[in-house]
Image (cartoon, rainbow, N blue to C red):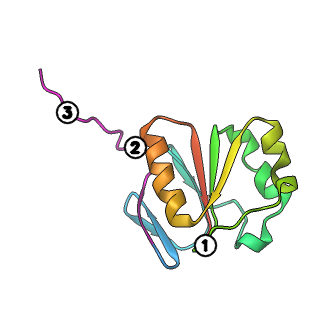
């Protein structure tokens, strides 16, 4: 019996990050992105952490993730809970971390088949 790791090559994973970019499956992006195992979106409408509004968090409600990782750029920042109250009320977990940490955590959760979304700011 052969034992080997099978991976889903269709899943979107972070393959790199640095100053001003993230790479998803080898493709570099230089803007805020929303990444899910099944796809990448660039329509979130956020340019930087200071521009976050409640409607930016409401964006995730139709996606229905189990957990949302917000990559806040080079340093970890926290949004006021009133901005993401609808997510809390919907039972969706949200975590704020620097973007490199969000990339690493996302890849781990996808490997565990968790319904995770990473929204990364650069």
Per the rendered image, the range of residues in magenta is 1-17
- Picture disc at residue 64: none
Seen from the viewer's position, the closer of residues 43 and 12 is: 12
Q: Which residue is mark 1?
A: 75
- Picture disc at residue 4: 3
Q: In front: mark 3 or mark 1? A: 1
Label 2, secondary structure: give it: loop
Q: In front: mark 1 or mark 2? A: 1
Placement of the N terminus among the 4 image quadrants: top left
Q: Earlier in the sequence, mark 2 or mark 3?
A: 3
Query: Which residue of the protein is positioned furthest toward the left in this rendering?
Result: 1
Q: Determine the main secondary structure of the stretch shown in magenta.
A: loop
Cα–Cα span, label 3 and label 1: 38 Å
Residue in view at x 45 percent, y 49 percent = 107
Q: Earlier in the sequence, mark 3 or mark 1?
A: 3
Cα–Cα span, label 2 and label 3: 18 Å
Q: Earlier in the sequence, mark 1 or mark 2?
A: 2
Seen from the viewer's position, the closer of residues 61 and 89 is: 89
Placement of the C terminus among the 4 image quadrants: bottom right
Give above or below for 106 relative to 74. above
Q: Is residue 88 left or right of residue 37?
A: right
Label 1, secondary structure: give it: loop
């Amino acid at each position: 019996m052969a034992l080997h790791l099978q991976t889903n090559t269709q899943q979107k994973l972070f393959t790199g990050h640095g100053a001003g970019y993230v790479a998803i499956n080898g493709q570099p992006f230089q803007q805020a992105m929303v990444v899910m195992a099944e796809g990448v979106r660039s329509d979130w409408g956020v340019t930087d952490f200071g521009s976050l509004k409640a409607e930016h968090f409401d964006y995730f409600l139709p996606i229905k993730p189990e957990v949302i990782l917000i990559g806040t750029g080079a340093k970890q920042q926290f949004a006021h809970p009133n901005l993401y109250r609808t997510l809390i009320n919907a039972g969706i977990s949200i975590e704020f971390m620097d973007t490199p940490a969000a990339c690493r955590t996302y890849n781990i959760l996808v490997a565990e088949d968790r319904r995770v979304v990473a929204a990364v700011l650069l």
